[in-house]
Amino acid sequence: MNVSKLYVGNLKYSATETDLKELFSKFGEVKSVTLIGNKGFGFVEMGTPEEAQKAKEALDGTDFLGRALKIDAAKPPEKKEFRGGDRGDRGERRPFRRNRDF
């Protein structure tokens, strides 16, 4: 693993960024912690890829606030393809016209 940002899943909704920072700091420098609104997951960025790997190996599957953590290397967000709407030949949005003259 050559990334320092980790996905942390299966979190209890009451978990805080402070809780995660405290948990992960046992394995090195915690650069940032981001919880994704009431979704039960977040991201922790460690100081180095080695620290991230050590934290992943030690914490994946362990109990945290009554839930088994799921930890993996964070992946970049997927680019979402636009679906729907009227697009011209070049992909630009065109205004909706109720009464078109054909």
Image (cartoon, helix red, strand yellow):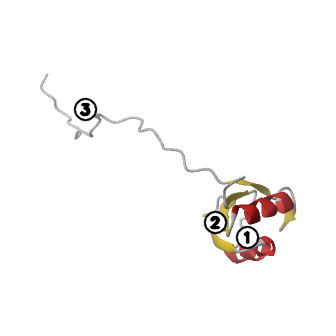
**Which residue is tagged 3?**
88
What's the CA distance linking mark 3 and mark 2? Answer: 39 Å
Q: Residues within 10 Å of mark 3 (few under 14, many from 20)?
A: few
What's the CA distance linking mark 3 and mark 1? Answer: 46 Å
In the depicted view, which residue is nearer to us: 10 or 6? 6
**Which residue is tagged 1?**
15
Q: Amino acid at mark 3?
A: Gly
The residue at 55%/49% (across/down) is 77
Figure check: 92 above or below 7: above
Say what secondary structure mark 2 lies in. strand
Q: Quadrant of the C terminus?
A: top left
Q: Are marks 1 and 2 in contact (CB under 8 Å)?
A: yes
Q: Is residue 87 left or right of residue 72?
A: left
- Tell me how many marks there are: 3
Q: Are marks 3 and 2 in contact (CB under 8 Å)?
A: no
| Image-quadrant location for residue 35 | bottom right
Say what secondary structure mark 3 lies in. loop
Precedes in sequence: disc 3 or disc 1 = 1
Q: Is residue 26 left or right of residue 85?
A: right
Q: Residues within 10 Å of mark 2 (few under 14, many from 20)?
A: some
Q: Amino acid at mark 1?
A: Ala
Q: Are marks 3 and 1 in contact (CB under 8 Å)?
A: no
What's the CA distance linking mark 1 and mark 2? Answer: 9 Å
In the depicted view, which residue is nearer to us: 99 or 34? 34
Q: Tell me residue 98's x, y (percent).
A: 20, 35
**Which residue is tagged 2?**
35
Precedes in sequence: disc 1 or disc 2 = 1
Figure check: 18 above or below 62: below
Precedes in sequence: disc 3 or disc 2 = 2
Q: Tell me residue 22's x, y (percent).
A: 76, 77
